[in-house]
């Protein structure tokens, strides 16, 4: 809990314009409120500190709407709610660039308003403002509210540095090797409304398959063979779901497998399978094998109900990121992601995480958003066709407000990474991990990208035919700035 006991002197009391006869204490019920926004800024002539005028959220009744409480706060005091300051800085930029429109940040306040000192409290991880116990609370006619001064260069810089420091503090809390941030393009920082998470956040209406369906391999043990866990694909019930190793099929199996591929019906159980990861001491140890990199086959890792134990080599993605990453600002694609070390083909980077929401909620969020702004929605539709799942039952991962570093990965039509389905429950077709792997060797500081469309070649050919036809609707589309020779020109076709 954060508290500031010393009430700030108000502008009115310093300038002597406070009209104490009009002083109004807000009704008791308004004493705790969430913060709405910053509506003004001043450079305090006495302390030379920056001070921001905060508007608090008021209940939807006439009195409250007409008398929104406001209070002045220093940058230090805003340290627990810097995303509000970040919004204010962005709004100042927007106002300056909207040359045809004059926007006043206080335009919506038509009446006399209360300006009084507030204190911050954190309730359920959200910052609220409570009115100070000080009697120094007054009302002020709107015309007396100072119009926001233009932020001094020094104060803007101080605010930007405080915002950047907060983002770096959050980066340090992420599990695994360090993640840094770099921006040589401008002074911005990714939104502080965004939070890093380690696991999916399951939202209402989304259900994982029953725990009882999480079956594990029972005949395996931690010390099998060369001590690599589930080495023997014929013995391991998890690896039974792995990709068929065509090289090792006998004639009868080869015939059956060809039929299964043609009709997409039948079972590959009992056929030799391919282990997904390199398991021996080469520099590729732990990397996804080419066999999987080039196929769209899901990876079924061992799970908590398996007898092989945590050291089993059929567990890679579940142990998390092992590479050092950097979030950096690009010239034309917003923020991007790069690795600070060389990645060999098949290296696991990280999963794409977020809130898991229903298709209906995703559509509503999409409709609310601006198409030209960034999209962070990723459909979990890998098994849609094979399992006949209707579109409305598909879940969607939204990485806008909660996610991991891969949420900053941009699209490329010729990407250096690819996304793969990783499942720990063979019987859950609606929730699984989306894991990003290097698709080729990648040099340090090279931007990491993947193809947002993730289509097979056949589908891509269809799309190419569509492009000319659909360019007429180009206003709806987001232009692609990947710069690849074979760029499809639009992000989503
Ligand atoms: C998952 S986010 C990637 C991170 C994003 N650049 C950011 O600053 O937060 C996807 C969004 O990034 C932008 N983007 C990604 N790849 C792009 C590309 N090749 N060309 C233009 N914009 C791109 C688009 O706005 C897209 O909706």
Image (cartoon, rainbow, N blue to C red):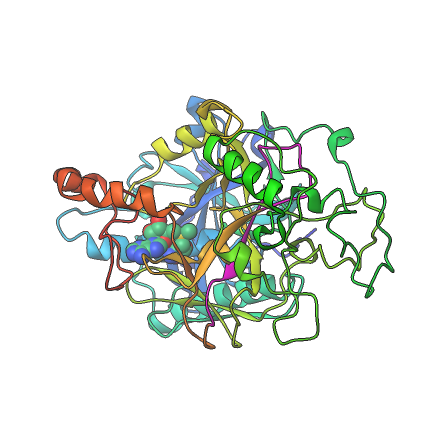
Q: Is residue 196 above or below residue 477?
A: below
- Is residue 433 highlighted in magenta? yes
Ligand 1 in which quarter? bottom left
Residue 232, given in percent of the width and then of the height, sits at 76, 54
What residue sits 60% from the left and 36% below the top? Answer: 431
Residue 420, given in percent of the width and then of the height, sits at 53, 50
Judging depth in this view, the residue of 428 and 281 nearest the camera is 281
What residue sits 43% from the left and 46% below the top? Answer: 376
- Is residue 493 highlighted in magenta? no
Judging depth in this view, the residue of 476 and 137 nearest the camera is 476
- The part of the image, by quadrant, that contains residue 354 is top right
**Magenta stretch mostly in which secondary structure?**
loop
Judging depth in this view, the residue of 414 and 5 nearest the camera is 414
The region drawn magenta spans 422-441
Judging depth in this view, the residue of 252 and 447 nearest the camera is 252
What residue sits 42% from the left and 68% below the top? Answer: 328
Considering every residue shown, the one lying at the far front of the view is: 251
Q: Is residue 47 visible?
A: no
- The part of the image, by quadrant, that contains residue 472 is top left
What residue sits 53% from the left and 63% below the top? Answer: 167
Q: Is residue 469 above or below residue 235?
A: above
Residue 126, given in percent of the width and then of the height, sits at 60, 44
Residue 304, given in percent of the width and then of the height, sits at 79, 45
Q: Is residue 295 visible?
A: yes
Count of numbered marks: 0
Q: Is residue 35 above or below residue 194?
A: above
Position of the C terminus, as image quadrant, is: top left
**Horizontal side of residue 164 vs 153, given as left or right:** right
């Amino acid at each position: 809990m954060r508290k500031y006991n010393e009430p700030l002197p108000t502008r009115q009391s310093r300038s002597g314009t406070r009209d104490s006869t009009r002083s109004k204490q807000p009704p008791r019920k308004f004493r705790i409120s969430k913060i709405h926004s910053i509506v003004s800024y001043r450079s305090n002539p006495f302390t030379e500190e920056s001070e921001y005028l905060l508007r608090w959220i008021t209940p939807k009744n006439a009195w409250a709407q007409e008398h929104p409480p406001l209070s002045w706060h220093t940058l230090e005091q805003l340290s627990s709610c810097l995303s509000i300051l970040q919004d204010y800085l962005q709004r100042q930029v927007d106002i300056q660039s909207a040359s045809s429109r004059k926007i006043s940040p206080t335009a919506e306040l038509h009446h006399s308003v209360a300006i009084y000192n507030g204190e911050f409290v954190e309730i359920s991880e959200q910052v609220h403002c409570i009115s100070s116990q000080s009697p120094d609370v007054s009302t002020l006619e709107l015309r007396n509210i100072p119009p926001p001064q233009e932020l001094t260069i020094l104060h803007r810089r101080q605010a930007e540095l405080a915002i950047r420091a907060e983002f770096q503090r959050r980066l340090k809390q992420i599990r695994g090797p360090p993640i840094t941030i770099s921006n040589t393009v401008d002074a911005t920082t990714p939104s502080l409304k965004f939070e890093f998470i380690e696991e999916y956040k399951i939202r209402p209406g989304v259900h994982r398959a029953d725990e009882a369906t999480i079956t594990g391999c029972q005949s395996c043990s931690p010390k099998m063979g060369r001590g690599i866990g589930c080495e023997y694909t014929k013995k391991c019930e998890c690896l039974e779901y792995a990709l068929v190793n065509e090289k090792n099929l006998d004639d009868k199996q080869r015939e059956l497998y060809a039929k299964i591929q043609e009709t997409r019906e039948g079972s590959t159980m009992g056929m030799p399978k391919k282990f997904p990861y390199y398991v021996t001491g080469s520099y590729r140890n732990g990397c996804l094998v080419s066999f999987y990199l080039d196929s769209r086959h899901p990876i079924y890792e061992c799970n908590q109900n398996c007898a092989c134990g945590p050291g089993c080599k059929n567990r890679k993605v579940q142990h998390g990121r092992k590479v050092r990453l950097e979030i950096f600002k690009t010239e034309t694609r917003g923020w991007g992601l790069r690795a600070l070390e060389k990645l060999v083909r098949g290296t696991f980077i990280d999963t794409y995480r977020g809130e898991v929401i229903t298709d209906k909620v995703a559509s509503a969020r999409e409709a609310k958003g601006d198409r030209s702004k960034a999209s962070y929605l990723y459909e979990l539709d890998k098994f849609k066709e094979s399992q006949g799942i209707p579109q409305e039952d598909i879940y969607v991962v939204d990485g806008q407000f909660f996610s991991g570093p891969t949420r900053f990965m941009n699209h490329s039509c010729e990407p250096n990474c690819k996304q793969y389905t990783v499942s720990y429950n063979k019987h859950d077709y609606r929730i699984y991990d989306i894991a990003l792997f290097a698709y080729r060797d990648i040099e340090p500081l090279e931007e990491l990208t993947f193809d947002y469309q993730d289509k097979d070649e056949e589908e891509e050919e269809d799309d190419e035919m569509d492009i000319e036809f659909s360019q007429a609707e180009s206003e709806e589309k987001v232009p692609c700035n990947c710069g690849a020779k074979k760029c499809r020109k639009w992000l989503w076709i």
